[in-house]
């Protein structure tokens, strides 16, 4: 049985215990507060990041991993596991250039090694655990002995079946990131407006609704999921938060009143997505249970 190595960038927000269990190779992103640069998950924890974010006047800058860095990652894996296949899954090309970096890195290695290269690069068309769930699925299938084509087909199927809604608690970060005008942010804050965001088929974030008041917004998120999934009631769910565990547990509880939940994943939204949606945000991802 040919070994398959799963690679993902750190924006997948896969819990550390799962990463270690399946031997997933995580390539960290970089971010900077002014002149200070950090490697996500190594130099700065999630808690430290959100603490700094809440105190910073300006948004930190985030940078994708370069093609040369992916070349190094792939070549190291090829040397360590010379007979293995590599499946590399990344944050949506509609949100970051990371996928393109990985594709270019593969091309650079192919120019050097030719047909000996066995790397498959996948555009998840999602973010945070929206593609983390695909990464974990791929790792589980690889461990169970599935082939590369089988894994790629299943990752694609689940990607098309998943659904996500982000419930944003404060408007400041959408405004700082240019997704919301300053006047609209001030007016929305005064009216206690809670935006609900999702990800479209092209992998870009878009606004679904704007609800006044937290409780109504949470109820609206659940209502949207129920509408999306029709008669399908058996689901897996991942609830990810930006330092808002209470909000995450609230959504999880309400979802349990409408769906039969088989697998639950709780994790944090990392720096790249968290920079733009801000503290208090809760993202909920669901996909059909087998």
Image (spheres, helix red, strand yellow):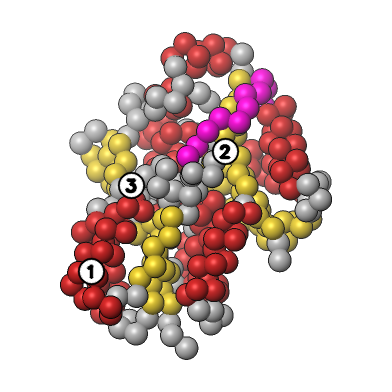
Query: In this image, 260 relative to 138: left or right?
Result: right
Magenta-drawn segment: 204-214
Q: Do the residues labelled 1 and 3 touch (CB within 8 Å)?
A: no
Depth order, front residue of 254/120: 120
Query: In this image, 235 relative to 22: left or right?
Result: right
Residue 253 magenta: no
Q: How crowded is mark 2: few (under 14 residues within 10 Å), some or many (20 or more)?
A: many
Looking at the image, residue 198 lies above or below residue 122: above
- How many marks the image carries: the answer is 3
Residue 209 magenta: yes
- Chain-order first, disc 2 or disc 3: 3
The secondary structure that most of the magenta stretch takes on is strand
Looking at the image, residue 87 lies above or below residue 36: below
Residue at 79% from the left image edge and 53% from the top image edge: 233
- Chain-order first, disc 2 or disc 1: 1
Query: In this image, 131 relative to 192: left or right?
Result: left
Q: Which mark identifies residue 109?
A: 1
Residue reaching furthest to the bottom: 1
Whether residue 204 is visible: yes
- Residue picked out by circle 2: 198
The quadrant of the picture occupied by the C terminus is bottom right
Q: Distance between the residues labelled 2 and 1?
A: 35 Å
Label 1 sits on a secondary structure element that is helix
Label 3 sits on a secondary structure element that is loop
- Chain-order first, disc 1 or disc 3: 3
- Residue picked out by circle 3: 97
Looking at the image, residue 290 lies above or below residue 187: below
């Amino acid at each position: 049985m040919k070994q398959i190595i799963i690679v993902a960038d750190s924006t997948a927000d896969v819990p550390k215990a799962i990463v270690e269990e399946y031997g997933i190779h995580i390539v960290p992103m970089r971010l900077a507060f002014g002149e200070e640069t950090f490697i996500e998950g190594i130099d700065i924890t999630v808690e430290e990041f959100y603490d700094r974010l809440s105190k910073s006047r300006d948004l930190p800058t985030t940078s994708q991993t370069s093609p040369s860095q992916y070349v190094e990652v792939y070549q190291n894996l090829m040397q360590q596991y010379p007979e293995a296949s590599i499946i590399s899954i990344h944050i949506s090309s509609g949100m970051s250039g990371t996928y393109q970096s990985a594709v270019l890195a593969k091309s650079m290695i192919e120019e050097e090694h030719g047909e000996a290269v066995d790397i498959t690069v996948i555009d998840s068309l999602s973010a945070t655990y929206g593609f983390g769930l695909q990464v974990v699925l791929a790792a589980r299938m690889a461990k169970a002995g599935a082939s590369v084509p089988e894994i790629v087909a299943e990752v694609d199927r689940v990607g098309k079946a998943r659904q996500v809604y982000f419930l944003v608690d404060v408007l400041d970060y959408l405004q700082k990131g240019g997704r919301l005008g300053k006047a609209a942010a001030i007016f929305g804050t005064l009216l206690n407006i809670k935006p609900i965001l999702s990800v479209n088929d092209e992998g870009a974030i878009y606004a679904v609704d704007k609800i006044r008041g937290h409780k109504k917004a949470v109820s609206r998120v659940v209502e949207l999921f129920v509408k999306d999934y029709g008669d399908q009631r058996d689901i897996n769910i991942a609830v990810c938060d930006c330092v808002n565990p209470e909000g995450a547990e609230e959504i999880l509880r309400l979802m349990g009143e409408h769906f039969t939940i088989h697998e639950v994943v709780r994790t944090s939204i990392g720096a790249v997505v968290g920079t733009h949606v801000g503290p208090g945000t809760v993202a909920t991802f669901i996909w059909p249970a087998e």
